[in-house]
Amino acid sequence: MLIYANRSAESVMFADTLDDLVKRHPTRLEVIHWLESDRGMPTATGLRNLMPSSPASDAYLCGPAVFMDLAHDALVAAGLSPDAIYREVFTSIQANPFHTSVTGPPAATDVGTPVTAEVEGEDYTFHCPPDTVLLDAMLDHGIDAPFVCREGNCGACAFTLKAGEVEMRVNDTLDTYEIGKRVRLACQSVPVSGSIDMVIE
Ligand code: FES
């Protein structure tokens, strides 16, 4: 059984592939979608109600930490041993192994990339130093930018890129729809254009 939480039907990654797998292996795979657009945010009780009354096999959790905590609680409440519950854990690397600033064209001045940022209604301008993520630059400039994990897996630092380009080191939370809407993670975004215009709502 796969319990798959997404914001809406349009944001379900691999939906067609999963449908196809269920059709071809109806006795081996069951997929239950939890769509926030229909049910709101997942809850431990809600997840528990979707599970078998006595889960007998191992469980594998993947997603934002808060969601995995909820699912863990639901599984334990259903009687599964914590030893049978496995979580996906990511660790960020500290530097970008693909960064080629020595040979590539300069994307910014020595002091960094000029950034215009609207943060919860307040306008700021500052420079983001080379090879520095936007969240760090904002915090260094005293801007009260939102964040939680700083590892690219909670989405609390999401912003919309109005102009310019960034390179995200890690993205474990934004889906292709959000990326297409130019949503990015400030804790993982390094400017790669001559200037940046961004908004955090
Ligand atoms: S602070 Fe969690 S993804 Fe950036």
Image (spheres, rainbow, N blue to C red):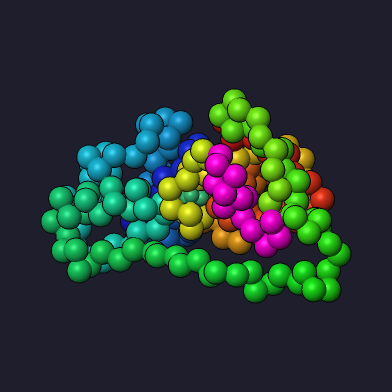
| Quarter of the view holding residue 188 | bottom right
Which residues are the magenta region? 129-143
Return the x and y of residue 133 as percentages of the image width and height.
62, 55
For residue 28, above or below residue 32: below
Front-most of 127 and 168? 127
**Magenta span includes 80:** no
Front-most of 129 and 80? 129
Front-most of 7 and 194? 194
For residue 147, above or below residue 26: above
Q: Is residue 174 visible?
A: no
Return the x and y of residue 31 as percentages of the image width and height.
39, 51
Q: Residue at x 48, y 54 (%)?
A: 150
| Count of marks, rendered view | 0
Return the x and y of residue 57 as percentages of the image width and height.
23, 65
Q: Residue at x 74, y 54 (%)?
A: 112
Q: Is residue 81 visible?
A: yes
Quadrant in which the N terminus appears: bottom left
In the rendered structure, the answer to whether residue 132 lies left or right of residue 152 reads right
Quadrant in which the C terminus appears: top right
